[in-house]
Image (tube, rainbow, N blue to C red):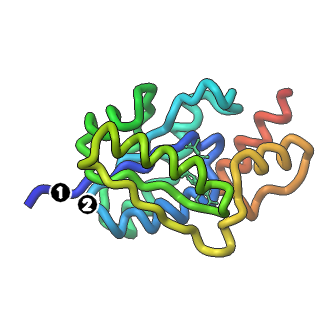
Amino acid sequence: MSKRIGLYPGTFDPLTLGHVDIIERAVKLVDELVIGVAINRDKGPLFTLDERTKMVADEMSKIEKKSGVAIRVVPFESLLIHFAQEVKAEIIVRGLRAVSDFEYEFQMVGMNQALNDDIETVFLMADARYQAIASRLVKEIARLGGDVKNFVPVAVEKALRAKFAKS
Ligand code: ADP
């Protein structure tokens, strides 16, 4: 039997406990998970693509060990659906928070289905403790000197502190 590959794409600027929770759920659905780190120039990311890719990869060994599912963290710059085809993903995993995510995700799925109807998008919800976490707000809090330890992994908290200490 061929193995089922899932793709979880995002900007991960930075990785939050919300993302981690979604990844822990996604590995239950697939034999291999590719985490696609988008370059996302439009969003003007705080961390470089290399920093974000490493930040995500560093957190994955624990989840790999616990789940037995191989996780690959791969930066990408191409169209999402092309990248999904390239890594042979059958499913794209997205996280859903509040209603505010819905409109954007609804459009994305519609467009992606038109481009390739064989790849299904699956939506997962994080545990209630993590649902309100957004990378954008984490950056804002960290920039203003607030405590983000309940929102991000320890290494990310350190990286945020280092980033804002410089600026
Ligand atoms: P993008 O730029 O693709 O929205 P993000 O890194 O912001 O990238 O998010 C990647 C995915 O993770 C998206 O599907 C987003 O909705 C989801 N996500 C982010 N934070 C959470 C959270 N706290 N709970 C559930 N899903 C989340």
Of labels 1 and 2, earlier in sequence is: 1
* Residue 165, numbered label: none
- Badges 1 and 2: C-beta atoms under 8 Å apart? yes
Could one spot residue 71 in this view of the protein? no
Left or right, 162 with reference to 4: right
- Residue beneath label 2, please? 31
Could one spot residue 43 in this view of the protein? yes
For the residue pair 17 and 100, the one nearer the viewer reads as: 100
User: Which residue is depicted at the point 37% across and 49% down?
Assistant: 7
Q: Is residue 105 above or below residue 74?
A: below
User: Which residue is depicted at the point 43% across and 48% down?
Assistant: 109
Left or right, 87 with reference to 93: left
Residue 86: name its quadrant. top left
Question: Which three-letter amino acid code belongs to the residue tagged 2?
Answer: Asp
Residue 16: name its quadrant. bottom right
- Residue beneath label 1, please? 3
